[in-house]
Image (cartoon, rainbow, N blue to C red):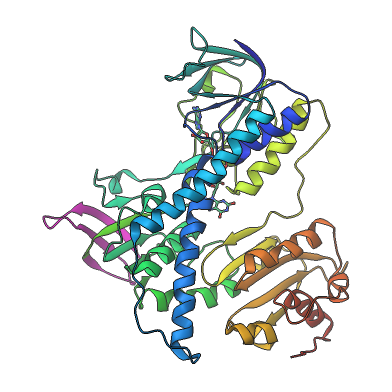
């Protein structure tokens, strides 16, 4: 069997590339090991985590009402874990069903198989899908490699117990453990920790470095850290290393800790290991091609997503940081257009990052630390949400909006937001960065009142010393 273009991996990078290539008139085959398209993002990442986070968020909003806003509820919430899990699965089913239809409508062939490279133009297909051609080989003119990433699990934590979970295990929501240890204070650990805490688990977070979300702007992390501290009842152990894990006789996991945050050992009903993800580049037969894989396991490619092998392009998590679904799909667009003969390049001024905790954190462009480390001349304009009428009305005054501005050109070079709905608000900043806006453009743009979006305008006004609060 021969195909002009095979896409290996059906995640947000792979299916976007395949659909866009089909729209360009190419004959496309997706090879995906799983029964459904969607990849990590749809099946065990972005979407299920947000479906569960929403449940946790609604519970905590009710608690806010109960606390001091003059509304009384008599009963405590009862969690039907099977129903919560079923709703999450329904969301996934709806979206994967939609993808299958989109593939069909575009006449994209989908083969359920594990693919690996025999050489630069031949793929071996393994599996039991009847559509696998006889001999199990597929030849191609071009391949877009979109095999994504998987959770990293150090051998010391891989103790063969279902009580020690990665993010996939945590999203399966087998039960709501009484106690949960989250190893790693990155975005996946904090999001999943928030889900379990919201559903009633007593959560502990342990982090090796001296702060949550290494890499994020410290001004943004501060209000979140405060809320996380409250959520975990002070059991946020920073600068602390997990030494070992072992299943104890009572069916719990005994964990040893070394650090000022915690020293000694403690037992937990479940442990979530969320210390990062590794690209899927091993076991693919890439050594039979000219593709170059770097020391971190990422496939090296240029701004057109071309690898060192003229027949193979790479996109998404396997092609490097940031490992985010929207980066994967935009790279997928570029790769599809390049295969179709267009001169496209992936050249973005900003790729937004969002942490869907409560409060949310979102940023785009340079963070202050990055600007500092790069020796860039910059000025900062910050607007605290305590001055926002909308934030006051919502009872969410802990937020802030921050622009980084190049003082010579007055162009915005970075934006960070912490607060309710920051993930939605960052879109305006990404557009501003992509369009090369000057800070004055944002200050002079009329924003609706009272909205949290106004804080983007207000912090731009702070740059000029003209911010006015209208309540
Ligand atoms: P993937 O989505 O990983 O898809 C790769 C596909 O390739 C998989 O379906 C896999 O089965 C298939 N595959 C691999 N090897 C083979 C093979 N040899 N043969 C056949 N098929 C193969 N990102 C965001 O932007 N926002 C979020 O909110 C967000 N939340 C997340 C929450 C969690 C818990 C996790 C784990 C991740 C989250 N991510 C989020 C990251 C996001 O899921 C990834 O960045 C994104 O899925 C990468 O897309 P991809 O197409 O590169 O690869």
Residue 338 shown in magenta:
no
Please indicate whether residue 115 sits to the left or right of residue 378 in the image.
left
Furthest residue to the top? 135
- State the residue in front, 209 or 461: 461
Q: Residue at x 57, y 85 (%)?
A: 395
Mark yes or no: residue 390 visible.
Answer: yes
Quadrant where the N terminus is found in the figure: top right
Please indicate whether residue 211 sits to the left or right of residue 180 in the image.
right
Q: Residue at x 80, y 89 (%)?
A: 468
Furthest residue to the left? 249
- The answer to which quarter of the image holds residue 94 is top right
Quadrant where the C terminus is found in the figure: bottom right
The spot of residue 247 in percent (x, y) is: 18, 52
- State the residue in front, 222 or 70: 70
From this view, report whether residue 209 is shown above or below residue 295.
below
Q: Residue at x 88, y 70 (%)?
A: 441
Query: What is the magenta range?
Result: 240-265
Mark yes or no: residue 239 visible.
Answer: no
- State the residue in front, 230 or 308: 230
Please indicate whether residue 364 sits to the left or right of residue 176 in the image.
right
Please indicate whether residue 198 sits to the left or right of residue 100 in the image.
left
From this view, report whether residue 175 is shown above or below residue 385.
above
The spot of residue 442 in percent (x, y) is: 84, 71
From this view, report whether residue 90 is shown above or below residue 121.
below
Residue 264 shown in magenta:
yes
- The answer to which quarter of the image holds residue 312 is top right
The spot of residue 363 in percent (x, y) is: 65, 64
- State the residue in front, 97 or 220: 97
């Amino acid at each position: 069997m021969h195909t002009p273009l095979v896409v290996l991996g059906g995640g947000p990078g792979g299916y976007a590339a395949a659909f866009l290539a089909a729209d360009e008139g190419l004959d496309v085959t997706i090879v995906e090991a799983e029964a459904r398209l969607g990849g990590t993002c749809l099946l065990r990442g972005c979407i299920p985590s947000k479906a569960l986070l929403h449940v946790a968020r609604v519970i905590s909003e009710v608690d806010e009402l109960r606390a001091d806003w003059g509304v009384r509820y008599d009963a405590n919430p009862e969690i039907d874990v099977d129903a919560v899990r079923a709703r999450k699965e329904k969301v996934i089913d709806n979206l994967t069903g939609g993808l299958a239809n989109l593939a069909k409508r575009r006449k994209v062939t989908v083969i359920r198989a594990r693919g690996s490279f025999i050489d630069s133009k031949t793929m071996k297909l393994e599996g039991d899908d009847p559509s696998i051609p006889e001999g199990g080989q597929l030849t191609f003119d071009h391949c877009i490699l979109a095999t994504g990433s998987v959770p990293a699990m150090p051998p010391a934590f891989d103790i063969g117990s279902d009580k020690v979970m990665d993010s996939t295990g945590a999203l399966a929501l087998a039960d709501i453990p009484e106690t949960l240890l989250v190893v790693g204070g990155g975005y996946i650990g904090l999001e999943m920790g928030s889900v379990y805490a919201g559903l009633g688990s007593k959560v502990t977070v342990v982090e090796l470095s001296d702060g949550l979300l290494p890499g994020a702007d410290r001004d943004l992390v501060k209000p979140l850290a405060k809320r996380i501290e409250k959520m975990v009842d002070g059991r946020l152990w920073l600068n602390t290393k997990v030494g070992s894990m072992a299943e104890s006789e009572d069916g719990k996991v005994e964990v040893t800790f070394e650090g000022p945050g915690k020293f000694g050992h403690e037992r937990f009903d479940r442990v979530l290991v969320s210390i990062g993800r590794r690209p899927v580049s091993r076991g693919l037969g890439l050594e039979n091609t000219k593709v170059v894989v770097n020391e971190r396991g990422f496939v090296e490619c240029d701004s057109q997503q071309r690898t060192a092998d003229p027949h193979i392009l790479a996109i998404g998590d396997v092609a490097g940081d940031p490992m985010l679904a929207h980066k994967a799909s935009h790279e997928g667009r570029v790769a599809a257009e390049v295969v179709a003969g267009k001169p496209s390049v992936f050249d973005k001024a900003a790729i937004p990052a969002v942490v869907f905790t409560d409060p949310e954190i979102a940023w785009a462009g340079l963070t202050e630390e990055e600007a500092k480390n790069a020796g860039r001349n910059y000025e900062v304009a910050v607007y605290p949400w305590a001055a926002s009428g909308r934030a006051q009305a919502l009872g969410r005054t802990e937020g802030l909006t921050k622009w980084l501005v190049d003082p010579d050109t007055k162009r915005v070079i970075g934006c960070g937001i912490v607060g309710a709905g920051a993930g939605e608000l960052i879109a305006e900043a990404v557009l501003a960065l992509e369009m090369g806006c000057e800070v004055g453009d944002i200050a002079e743009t009329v924003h609706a009142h009272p909205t949290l979006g106004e804080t983007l305008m207000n912090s731009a006004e702070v740059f000029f010393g003209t911010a006015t609060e209208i309540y």
